[in-house]
Structure formats: C-alpha cells, structure tokens
Amino acid sequence: MNTSPAVLGIFLAVLSPAAEPAAEAGALPDSTDADRTSVSVTVYNVNLGLVRETRSLKIPAAGISTLRFMDVPSSINPRTVHLESLTSPGALDVLEQNYEYDLISPDKLLEKYVGKEVEIVEQAEDLTTRTVRAELLSVNRGPVYRIGDRIVLGQTGRVTLPSVPPDLVPRPTLVWTLDAARAGAQEIEASYLTDGMSWSADYVAVVDADDRAAGLSGWVTVVNDSGATFRDAQLKLVAGDVRRVGPVLGMAGGIADMRVAKADADFEEEAFFEYHLYTLDRPTTLKQNQTKQIALLRAPSVPLVKRLLLVGQPHWYRSQVGTIASDQKVAVVLELKNAKEGGLGIPLPKGTVRVYKKDRSGAEQFAGEDSIDHTPKDETVKLHVGDAFDVVADRTQTDYRAISRRQSESAYEISIRNRKEEDVTVTVREPVGGDWEIVQSSLPWKKLDARTVEFEVPVPKGQEVKLAYRVRVRW
C-alpha cells in the first residue's frame, strides 16, 4: 500500500498495545526464543543455513492442541521443518502447519479496519484534544474517512484502534496443530532450512623479502540475513559444492553490523559426505543483519614459488599472423603447496587470497589478489596476483607454411626484456593444440601435456633474450 504524504503525520495507537493474537482455547502457550535451550547453525556457501534448536515446552493436556512457534527466520523454508520430541520420541506429532508472515505494521493495521469505525484524536494549538469517530472507507494511496455525512481526505490526528486483529502476528510464526500422547514438560528439537545465510573464506599472505615463503592466515566471513538472531549457537560451516534444486538467490539486504571475533578462535575440520565440515570450538551469536569474521587458520611460513609466466593462444598456430604482440604483459604467479610440511595440509575453502609484502621501511603493501576454489590437502594453490612492471615481451610469427589442408609449419620469435636489477627466469607456455612437433628450438623445451609446450627462458638483468622455435602442427 502506498501512503500519501498527507497521512505521514498520522500516529497509530492500539488501545490494547500489549495484546497479541490470542491463542485458541486449550492451546499450548506461545513458544519464543526464551524457551530455547540450545541452537546449532550450519551455514553453507550457497546462501543456505540449517538450524537445529531445542526448546522446553509444557503440554497442558493430551490430545490435539495448537502451538505458535515464534522467533523463526523470515527467510525460513516452511517445507523443511521437522519436529521431534527428545523427551518422549514418537509421542508428539504435527498434524498441520501454517506459516504466518502477515506482520503487524501501520499499513496492515489500517487495512484490517477498512469498513470499520476508528477513533481519531486531534490536538489543537492550545494542546487540548478532541476525539472524532470516523468510518475508515479506504487506505488506497492514503486513508479515506466518513465523518458524519462527509467524506474526509488528509485527516490529521492520532488514529486509535481497539485491538490487534487476530490474523496479524508481531513476528514470523509457525502455527502447529499438535497431537500429544501425554501432558507435561517436553524437550523438543525443531530443524529447518533458511535462506539468507552464507559464508566465504578470505586469506592474507605476507610474502617474505626473497619471495620464497609467505605467512598465511585465513578468516571466514559469516553473513546472517535470515531474519532471526541465534544467540550462543554452535556454528558449523560446510565447504563444498552442495547442489540445490531451483535458482540460488544472491545475498539480499544490507549489512547493518560487522563484528570481528577474537583471533584465538579456531575451527575443527572433518570430512563430511563429499564435503568438509568446520566446527567452531566455542558458542557464538549470529545477529540478524550481521557480518561476523572468525579466524580459520594460521601458517607462519609456507614455502612459496614465484613464477613469471608468459602464455600464448592456440589459434596462432593455424594461420599466418605476423607480428602478434608488442610489450606483452608477463604474469606474476605465486604457487603455494597445501602440505603439512609447510604448516597447512588441511582442506582450504574457496575464497579470496590477498597478498602483501613489506617495503624497505617495514610497512606491508598490497601486492595483488586472486580467488581460489576449494583446494584439498597436498594440492598446489596458484595465485595470479598481477603483471610484472619491468619484464615485457614481443611475440612475432617469423614464418608460416601450409603443408596441406590440415597441416602447417610456422616459426616464432619471442623477445623478452628484463629491466630489473636482478636476473629473472620467464616460463613460456604455448598451447599449440592438435598433433604437434617441435622441429627446431633455440632453448630446451618440454612437453607439459598433450596440448602444451613449455620453455624456461633465463634473462639476465638489463638484457634481452630471444626464444626462437619452429613447430609443425596437424589437426
């Protein structure tokens, strides 16, 4: 409903402000988060959370009754709710469930009183008040009243209503029709899936002076935009590509609060199905609209290999192209082994790795970043953090000869210039493709795989080195 500016000054006052929709006669008391005895939250990195909470309920009588299960996330998937009695398994059944999300608001309250009489309290300049009785005719683009025999628009004053309509709820609520085998206290566990929860990993790598090792620290960032707060929750994170049916929506809403957990927090990792599960070693509170960061790992000195990498394109080998590129960028790639010997050796969740290095004054400077996928232990992490400033290359096709319709021979020259104050080695990887053969080369080469030939090109400081090779390709 769109409210006109003329009505923005209207205040709504319910004559029984503390009243909430009354429970049915013989119904169970409302269950709120005050009845919660424990809660566990498992967050997936696909905008999904699994909540398992236990609550204490008092069942006044055996048989059928109604319970309003309140303080659930507004993004809950009601189809996934499961209820079980921990006190007497099998003694409590859900016969019917309704998800009530018609929340109390000024607009909703006015809509429920269309066609009914309300009271409008007006205040004069001398602060005296008078009460006017009016019939609310419409709330479409602003309230329309009948006062006496007049139709009134833009009426000012404070609108008072006698009560809250029973079909409005103050917060998202599950209404259950229960069949209990016996009366008395029951400890129940409710589990459900909710959207609006996600997590990601972020890493910081600080490279040492000679680029041979890096201190690596990892953080997880948990976002709760589910519509509910979970206090003192046991937090678990699932890393892996969990399949969901239907579209996976992006994270909605803004971030209202950011909390950084203490750095001494830690996770215990375990294999789970075909994924990996990380369990926080202490309870934590996940507030609604909160982004929380928690330490994941620390490795003070991980062996590092820095490569200067120049990569070609496969289509260059099937036609006459001439000069291919001048001042071609040379990529800077860092390789870290995810091994126990280097202080790692654990499954690394996908995320972003940001690389820093100290300058001469000892201050850390940002050197680049790259994203990684889920990386098992003993695999190599490769980070393309940027391009070299002082190392450039020219690439030219010096000869091309078509041998047949599906076979050609071509020659290439790659000139690499090193303007640094130190010697470097540039790795040249050429994705030739097809059935290829190196006919001639000025430097040693190796067949990296069926489609790639690799050269290691040493380039002394301040000099230029040329790599020349000839290749015959059949496709």
Image (tube, helix red, strand yellow):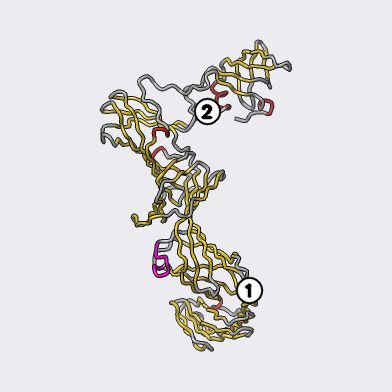
- Depicted 190 relative to depicted 271: above or below: above
Point out which mark residue 381 bears. Answer: none
Alpha-carbon neighbours of circle 1 within 10 Å: few (<14), some, or many (≥20)? few
Q: What residue type is labelled 2?
A: Ile
Q: What residue type is labelled 1?
A: Phe
In the image, taking residue 268 as reference, residue 114 lies left or right, namely right
Q: Position of residue 110 (x, y in %)?
A: 57, 23
Q: Which residue lies furthest to the top in this view?
A: 148
Cα distance, mark 1 to mark 2?
61 Å
The residue where tag 1 is placed is 389
Dividing the picture into quadrants, the one containing residue 114 is: top right
Q: Which of marks 1 and 2 is nearer the N terminus?
A: 2
Front residue of this view, candidates 189 and 210:
210
In the image, taking residue 64 as reference, residue 346 lies left or right, namely right
User: Residue 81 lies in magenta, yes or no?
Assistant: no
Name the residue located 39 percent from the left edge and 21 percent from the top edge. 24
The residue where tag 2 is placed is 104
In this picture, which residue range is highlighted in magenta? 339-346
